[in-house]
Image (tube, grey):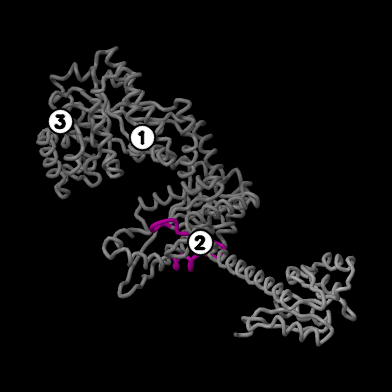
Amino acid sequence: MNPSNKINILLVDDRPENLLALEAIIERDEFNLIKAFSGEEALKYLLKYDFAAILLDVQMPGMDGFSTAKIIKAREKTKNIPILFITANNLDSEHIFMGYSVGAIDYILKPFDPLILKSKVERFVELYQLNQKIVAQSEALEEKNMIIEHMAYHDGLTKLPNRRMFQDVLIQKLAESKTENETLGLMYLDLDRFKTINDSLGHIMGDKILKKVSERFIENVRQTDFVARIGGDEFVIILSKSNREECLEVAEALIDSFNSPIHIDNFEFYLTTSIGLSIFPYDGEDTSTLFKNADAALYRAKEQGKNKYKVYHSGMNMESYRRFLIQNDIRKAIQSEQFTLVFQPKVNLETYQIDSAESLIRWNHPKWGLLKPIEFISLAEETNLILDIDKWVLKKVCEQITYWKETYNKSIRVSVNFSAQHFLQRNLIEQIKEILEDTNVDPTLLEIEVTETVLLRSKDSVKQTLEQLKELNIHISLDDYGKGYSSINYLREFPFDTVKIDKAFIQEITCPQKHSRLIIESTIALMKNLGLNVVAEGVETIEQLNLLKEFKCDEVQGFIFSKPLSTNDFIRYVDKHKQNSSIIDSQWIKNNEKVEILDISEETGINKSLITLSIKKVKMEYSLSTRELDVFSLIVKGLSNKEISEKLFISEHTVKNHITNIFSKLNVSDRVQAIALVYETSINETKVH
């Protein structure tokens, strides 16, 4: 047997003949018997070897057995080795008790019985072997537990931390940032068009690409950054103790890293990634809010063309700061009933009567005035407050329909726009039934508009919900037809009553190069043959109107007839059309040939001239230099240090110095506070004017 595999047993006695006798009795091939002639020598061997048992003579010159046993039991490494005392049979009981008190397991009296001695030693060896097995099993179990724990907290493909570990680390890092009063960045990354690779080349190739992408992410972040894969082609990066500029530098490095291709086998892949970034504490003070806002920023990056990063950060620019404030005010708006409804008529092209209308929400913001849906609906969807808003709209519309019918004897069908999120609700139909009963409305006068994006969410679920709405005798419309996929299959599978042609086609109907005229004519003919009502949205000119009449379009909606009207103005408009229906075709067109079309883009957002005026006022009040004014104006626009450097042809170091001086003069600590100062100045200027 290999000596290293043998079981060590220590024999300690000052007399050689006793050691030989012990050796002769207990010797076996698997034992390695080590002899010591004194207590001191025994202690030296104990430092070198691991022993299964110690046979120790009590009466030895110098260090006796009791003293040796005390030292053995005092050492951490040797305290659990069983000691078998060997002594003369005339040892009194006091000495025997002394032996047990210092750690002896048993006594063997001289002259000893060979069978008893051999049996006792073998029992000690068995216990030692059993203990060794337990230790080995424990170590193996611990190793397996470490493997299981690693698997539980790491992605099996890329070996990066997974979603579970990311959540734990984010909680930890966020707590540290709060304690140390530091900012923290959270990036949400998604590969652009990765599904195409999986679909065309298979998941094996897709997995190889994900491994390479993971390596590229690791190579282009800092050592202190935490990278994790949370599913599919989605990754997250935690940037501890990082301000906005530092986070942007990392984002730019990651975007730039994909300029070089990824080589796998014989393929060369040019990939891009989109990144959403949120910053603690500006974009949230808890993990769920930070993650949700990073996801929202990623969605914007995808929506705006991919291969870019977007920052949710409220201090990104003046407009986004305004969005941040608006988002915080939405919940208050619901509670304070700051929302109101306007109604845009749909004119029947055969009778020129108003048979239906579309309800549109407006927000009477206490500071910003009247806000249109484009300025707050997307924010409401991001925060799930859209469900409460749409429920409020539905109830108000039903109340208005009932009021018009009871007060003015007018049966006007009114449409309500429904967000895609509603169709994920389990109790949507029950809510609608409850509102119908509470308002005593005729369900045939209620119209619900859905867009193609709704149909893409969950086809079977949406179809079932629409069919349940039809059973309630509610009118169903497909809105913005032509804007998205425009699948004719939708018309076959879903129970629509009306199709609304998107205004983008209507506005190009007179342009021969766009073929919109032919498309609209064919679309209307198809819808009519399918028994569907057709509405043209965004009609603004006489030429558009005449062509739609020629194509037998049922209804039109747009500024050529009316902008969205308040409740009272809408009723007056309906009465006017009813009174002039016989001459409306010629006289109305004559009176409206010079209709002024509003530029929607100019109606929303912040007045740029007001911002410029506010910045100049800040310059004068805080004595900013001309160059500092240039830098400050670009900060308000949301440009990064690098972008300001390129715009003004100065170094980034100079930009940082200017920003430091500006913040010092304004008595602010970051961009958010600086932009807030401009915001407050703008508000005050609005009040003055």
Name the residue nearer the viewer: 315 or 251. 251
Count residues near mark 2 (Cα–Cα under 10 Å), then give few for <14, some for 14-19, many for 20+.
Answer: few
Sequence-first tag of 2 and 1: 2
Task: Give the residue pinned by disc 2.
Answer: 148
Residue occupied by mark 3: 554
Q: Are marks 3 and 2 in contact (CB under 8 Å)?
A: no
Q: Which residue is mark 1?
A: 426
Camera sees residue 190: no
User: From which residue to which does the magenta span run?
Assistant: 214-234
Front position among marks 2 and 1: 2
Q: Camera-side residue: 505 or 682?
A: 505
Q: Residue at x 25, y 39 (%)?
A: 480
User: Which secondary structure, mark 1?
Assistant: loop
Q: Vertical placement of 280 versus 425: above or below? A: below
Amino acid of disc 2: Ile
- Residue 188: x and y in percent read 45, 54
